[in-house]
Image (cartoon, rainbow, N blue to C red):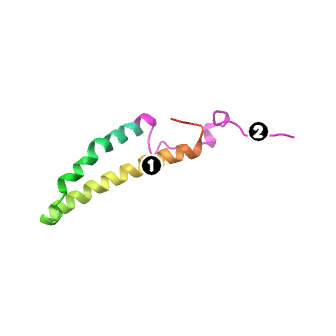
Amino acid sequence: MTSQVPTRAQIPDSDKWDLSHLFANVDKWKEDFRWIEQTYPRIKQWKGKLGASAKNLAECLEFEKTLDLKIERLYHFASLQLAEDSANTE
């Protein structure tokens, strides 16, 4: 008796992870990735200024928190997709 592992396409959607709570699709993931690429350099505006005021520190921490949350979502979506189907090179 031989058994074969089904391909990802042969597995019903009901048995696959639903990652739509992270991103609706890869295009939405790419949008956030581009946003990070474009926005991340703004962190330089606080260089040498964090101790100048509580407002500067709070703004920088809020900015960093926003970046961190988006980066985490990007990472988790990509890593879960890879774990789900390592044959998917997208």
Give the quadrant of residue 35: top left
The image shows residue 53 at horizontal and vertical percentages of 13, 64
Q: Of 44 and 74, which appears nearest the observer?
A: 44
Measuring 37% from the left and 41% from the top, which residue is drawn there?
Answer: 33
Whether the magenta-drawn stretch holds residue 56 is answered as no
Residue at image point 53% right, 47% down: 80
Residue at image mark 2: 4
Q: Position of residue 10 (x, y in %)?
A: 67, 34
**Looking at the picture, which amino acid does disc 1 mark?**
Tyr
Give the SS element for disc 1.
Answer: helix
25 displayed left or right of 9: left
For the residues bearing labels 1 and 2, Cβ distance under 8 angstroms: no
Between discs 1 and 2, the one toward the N terminus: 2
Single out the residue that lies furthest toward the right.
Answer: 1
What residue does disc 1 label?
75
| Tag count | 2
Over which residues does the magenta segment extend? 1-28
User: Residue 18: in sight, yes or no?
Assistant: no
Please report the residue visible at 47 percent of the width from the left and 45 percent of the height from the top. 77
Q: Please, what is the three-letter code of the amino acid marked with disc 2?
A: Gln
- Predominant secondary structure, magenta span: loop
Coordinates of residue 6 in the picture (x, y in percent): 71, 37
